[in-house]
Amino acid sequence: MPYGRRAGLVPRRPEDFGDGGAFPEVHVAQYPLSMGLHAAAPGSNILPVTVDAHGRVAFDAVVRHGENSGKIVYTSHADLVPKIADPHYNANDAKDEEIIEEVSARTRAALQALIDARVSAVNPASVPRHGTGRTSFVKYRPARQSAAFNSGAAERVVRVSHAQEDPVMPPKHRHKRFPCPAGSSSSPPVTVLHSPPRPASRKDAEEWRVPPCVSDWKNPKGYSVPLHKRVAASDGAGRVMRDVQISDGFASLTEALYVAEQKAREAVETRRMVATELNRKKAERREQELREIAKKARTEMAVAAAAPVDVEELQEKAQRDMVREDRRREREREERGEAASSSKKSASARDKDRDVSERVALGMASGTGVSGGGGEVPYDERLFNQDRGMDSGFAADDQYSVYSGRLFAAQPTLSTLYRTSNCWDSDTYGGDADEQLEKIAETSRFKPE
């Protein structure tokens, strides 16, 4: 990196130094070409402190060390958070495509290595591994450099590959062992003693006869085995001589099944008898109920036929029913009236709430009247004993008066009207307004102490 552009440079790897030495303007510990760097003691479990690009200590170096160095270990919370794709991501970016291709190639190579390891486990031992069959290229220069040789080429590249070996080919070299010559050792060879040959009897031949092995489940060659051969193989001498042992559990199982069957039959029979008895009792109970109903009906019919019908009693009963119905209607009417009175005012209450002028106009302002009890006048007395009216010309021609008399002519009516007192304002507020204003202004309520 040239001078003037080394701001923030922290050389840590040997590639940062290139072929030169340390950077004097960078004030950090530097070890160019690993000089002065003390190697860790063999077998030591102490790990150097590792920091990331932001200067934070990577505490997950402990779990990434050792056997986990070549594995993917998730140690941060960011590994658990799902990655959200950027909608503005450009898939045609060349740099991203190169990274994706590189990661895909490394992943494919790792998976292929795992598959090859699994496949090689089932291959014969004589089959060479893939490593031995790799192709190598060698570059050389021929001794003769003239144009007449090697087509005038100064250098050539030769591809060297191993020939594939046949895995089923027998070994080409055989190691044979030869006995030592007779004169090579002081002691003579060991004498081999053989028993004299004797012919085999028929019994020995039968005992030594081994039947062919015929499987009842497998036939890889697909041979057609005759039936008598299969029976002979299954009933060979070894199987005939075998003593068959029958377990006592079969007898116990048979006896247990027999006892269980008997118990089940008894339970079924008991349930059938109980159900039959219940049905019989139910039928008897139903028959008794029907018998009682028929008896009661016959008794009622006999009583109805014996008792004569009294017409007068029936009429009196009908009259009583009519009276009861009338009283019921009266009670309902009274209840409706009470309900209406609670929600609506009566006529007397409405008359009491009328204005004075309305009561005078209706002739109800007098405290005494001809009507007893309430004292209210049920009619307007001014309409009686009048010698003038519409039939008598109503009034003289030279008079322009709409009314024929005074409105408040009766003294009892005038006494009930409301009149304001002339001295009311003087008694309440005083005779002089200026005096009252001074009285209000001279109050000591809002004066400071």
Image (spheres, grey):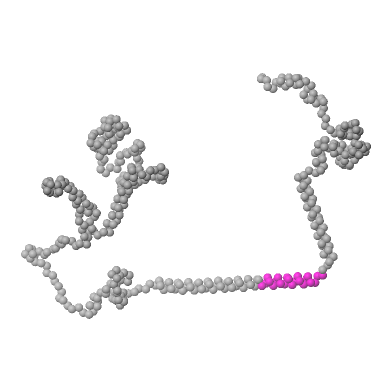
**Image quarter of the C terminus:** top right
- Residue 436 makes an appearance in the image: yes
- Name the residue at the bottom extreme: 202
Tell me what residue is drawn at x 23 percent, y 36 percent. 19
Above or below, 172 relative to 441: below
**Who is closer to the viewer here, 4 or 339?**
4
**Who is closer to the viewer here, 279 or 118?**
118
Check if residue 300 falls in the magenta segment. yes
Q: Position of residue 414 (x, y in %)?
A: 86, 32
The answer to which quarter of the image holds residue 116 is: bottom left
Q: Which residues are magenta?
A: 287-308
Tell me what residue is drawn at x 27 percent, y 36 percent. 16
- Residue 375 makes an appearance in the image: no
Image position of 397 (left or right of 38): right
- Name the residue at the front extreme: 397
- Magenta stretch secondary structure, dominant: helix
**Who is closer to the viewer here, 300 or 77?**
77
Image position of 252 (left or right of 280): left
Above or below, 163 relative to 191: above
Q: Position of residue 416 (x, y in %)?
A: 85, 34
**Image quarter of the N terminus:** top left
Above or below, 79 relative to 407: below
Check if residue 27 falls in the magenta segment. no
Image position of 347 (left or right of 191): right
**Who is closer to the viewer here, 373 or 346?**
346
Tell me what residue is drawn at x 81 percent, y 38 percent. 354
Q: Position of residue 364 (x, y in %)?
A: 85, 38
